[in-house]
Amino acid sequence: MEPPKHHDIRDLWSEAREVIDIAPFVDFKPARDKVENLVAELAFVDERSTALRYALQGGKPSLGDKAFKIDVGALLEHIDETCQYLVEYAHMMEAAWRRRRAGEM
């Protein structure tokens, strides 16, 4: 698998979701829905997935007026919650992989 040559968060999430969805032994739907909502929020304010990484472009704020529409506290809470789900998912995947490797599945 080649690393993507872009940063579009919707496309990156779509690619990651394909990998996540092949694990039928893990119920990731509640967490996946939260990640979907976060991705949609980020894509709404940063369509090209660059403005949150590069605060200024040409000396001007990258987000323009959209910067005032972001509830930073809520955004951080969503990001933290999403990271927790993804870490939990990774641990479940690793545990399932270890069981399968040991012949328990």
Image: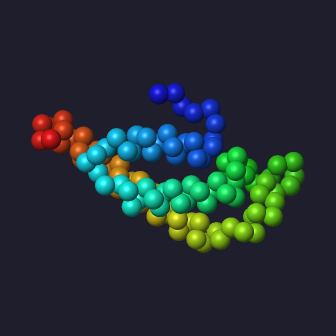
Q: Quadrant of residue 42?
A: bottom right
Q: Quadrant of residue 30?
A: bottom left
Residue found 35% across the figure and 49% down from its top: 90
The percent coordinates of residue 76 (x first, y second) are: 57, 66
Residue found 60% across the figure and 47% down from its top: 9
Relative to 63, does residue 17 appear above or below in the rendering?
A: above
The percent coordinates of residue 75 (x first, y second) are: 59, 66
Q: Is residue 85 visible?
A: no
Furthest residue in direction right, as rendered: 59
Residue found 57% across the figure and 33% down from its top: 4
62 vs 92, left or right, is right
Q: Please, which colouring scheme is shown?
A: rainbow
Furthest residue in direction left, as rendered: 104
The quadrant of the rendering that contains the C terminus is top left
Residue found 54% across the figure and 31% down from its top: 3
Total tally of numbered discs in the picture: 0
The percent coordinates of residue 92 (x first, y second) are: 29, 51
Relative to 31, does residue 14 appear above or below in the rendering?
A: above
The percent coordinates of residue 6 (x first, y second) are: 64, 36
Relative to 78, does residue 24 appear above or below in the rendering?
A: above
Q: Is residue 49 visible?
A: yes
Of residues 6 and 34, the one nearer the viewer is: 34
71 vs 36, left or right, is right
